[in-house]
């Protein structure tokens, strides 16, 4: 097996710099989770107050649903709280379960991704390997995301697996079904609580219009954009500075596409134990040292999408 190459932090930072940039704050981790839910709640409240704001609330909420997944990812690295039990409880019930994920299953999967990043054994390689695609192919993917087709297919498969439907008997079948149940049951519990809370507040419809609809549409789109930006068409799968990508994000992209410093993915792979709220700081230090030029960094998401969709269409055979 080909393990991805690593970078020693002290090869790039002094001990004092590394101690500063790698420091963790349990309050910051919990504060980010609280911030994520506060943005969702405020966007819902605004759209309930003025229904014409629903069209604006959907991308804001959908991006924060991605934010919950990003914070689950942070919990997988132990970055939400210094106490592991607190970290894992918050990571499971306040970030993973609401969007249909499961921290227990995600953690080993994701750490395997880090160990074998962009190598044949990388379980996430399936997300980046198909690129580049044609522009028409990318448009079809985006259309499926924005019309809920991607969400429906994923949830249908997840629920079917949870109830043993479509799983062939044999080695690993029960483990696969159990893993699906461990995601589906908490998802149903938390979503029922959200629906109940909104119903008691007199706004049952908001669950469908302001939680489920963003989850099925905008969240699917920005999750795809995240996956493309992080590893698709990177220049060198063997270089630890160039097998993951950092994409600069404007303030509005941070609001609607890339919350919680998720765009600093090259730094995350270089230093996987840095908390997400220190990645921008690490990037600034690396820039001061003139190291950014050695890394895979792109000026924006549009640039990455152009690179990922520059495959020429096949010419029709006469």
Image (cartoon, rainbow, N blue to C red):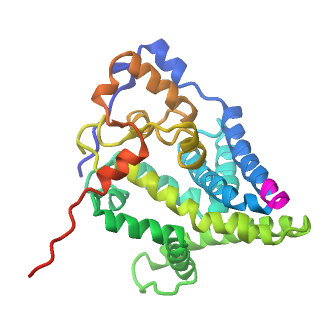
Relative horizontal placement of residue 168, taking residue 158 as reference (left or right): left
Q: Is residue 2 above or below residue 158?
A: above
Q: Residue at x 69, y 51 (%)?
A: 89
Q: How many marks?
A: 0
Residue drawn at (60%, 53%), measured in percent from left and top?
A: 63
User: Can you give x and y, in whole percent of width and height, for residue 81 in the image?
Assistant: 66, 38
The answer to whether residue 70 is magenta is no
Quadrant in the picture for residue 292: top left
Splitting the image into 4 quarters, where does residue 227 fall?
bottom left
Whether residue 139 is visible to the viewer of this picture, yes or no, is: yes
**Residue in front for this viewpoint, 259 or 19:** 259
Q: Where is residue 297 in the image (x, y as percent from the top left)?
A: 35, 35
Q: Give the range drawn in magenta.
A: 45-50
Q: Residue 192, how many percent across, how many down?
A: 77, 70
User: Could you tell me residue 136's position as x and y percent?
Assistant: 33, 67
Residue 49 is inside the magenta segment = yes
Residue 113 seen by the camera = no
Q: In the figure, 284 relative to 310: above or below? A: above
Placement of the C terminus among the 4 image quadrants: bottom left
Q: Quadrant of residue 47?
A: bottom right
When the figure is inspected, residue 271 is found, relative to residue 125, above or below; the finding is above
Left or right of 230 in this view: 163: right
State whether the magenta stretch is mostly helix, strand or loop: helix
User: Most extreme residue toward the left, as rendered?
Assistant: 318
Closer to the camera, 71 or 93? Answer: 71
Q: Residue at x 11, y 79 (%)?
A: 317
């Amino acid at each position: 097996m080909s393990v991805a190459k690593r970078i020693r932090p002290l090869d790039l930072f002094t001990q004092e710099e590394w101690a500063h940039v790698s420091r963790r704050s349990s309050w910051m981790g919990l504060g980010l989770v609280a911030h994520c839910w506060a943005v969702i709640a405020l966007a819902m409240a605004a759209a309930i107050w003025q229904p014409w704001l629903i069209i604006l609330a959907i991308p804001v909420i959908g991006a924060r649903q991605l934010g919950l997944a990003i914070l689950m990812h942070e919990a997988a690295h132990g970055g939400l709280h210094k106490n592991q039990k607190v970290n894992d409880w918050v990571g499971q019930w306040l970030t993973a379960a609401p969007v249909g994920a499961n921290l227990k299953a995600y953690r080993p999967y994701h750490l395997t991704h880090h160990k074998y990043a962009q190598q044949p054994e990388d379980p996430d390689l399936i997300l980046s390997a198909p690129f580049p695609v044609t522009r028409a192919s990318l448009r079809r993917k985006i259309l499926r995301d924005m019309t809920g087709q991607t969400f429906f297919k994923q949830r249908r498969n997840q629920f079917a697996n949870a109830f043993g439907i479509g799983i062939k008997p044999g080695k690993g079948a029960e483990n696969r079904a159990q893993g699906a149940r461990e995601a589906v049951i908490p998802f149903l519990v938390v979503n029922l609580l959200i629906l109940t809370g909104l119903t008691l507040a007199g706004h049952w419809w908001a669950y469908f219009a302001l939680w489920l609809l963003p989850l099925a549409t905008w969240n699917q789109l920005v999750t795809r954009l995240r996956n493309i930006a992080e590893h698709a068409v990177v220049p060198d799968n063997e270089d630890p500075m160039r097998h993951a990508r950092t994409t600069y994000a404007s303030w509005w992209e941070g609001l609607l596409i890339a919350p919680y410093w998720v765009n600093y993915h090259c730094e995350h792979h270089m230093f996987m134990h840095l908390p997400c709220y220190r990645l921008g700081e690490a990037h600034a230090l690396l820039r001061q040292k003139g190291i950014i030029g050695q890394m895979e960094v792109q000026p924006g998401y549009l640039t990455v999408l152009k690179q990922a969709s520059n495959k020429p269409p096949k010419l029709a055979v006469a």
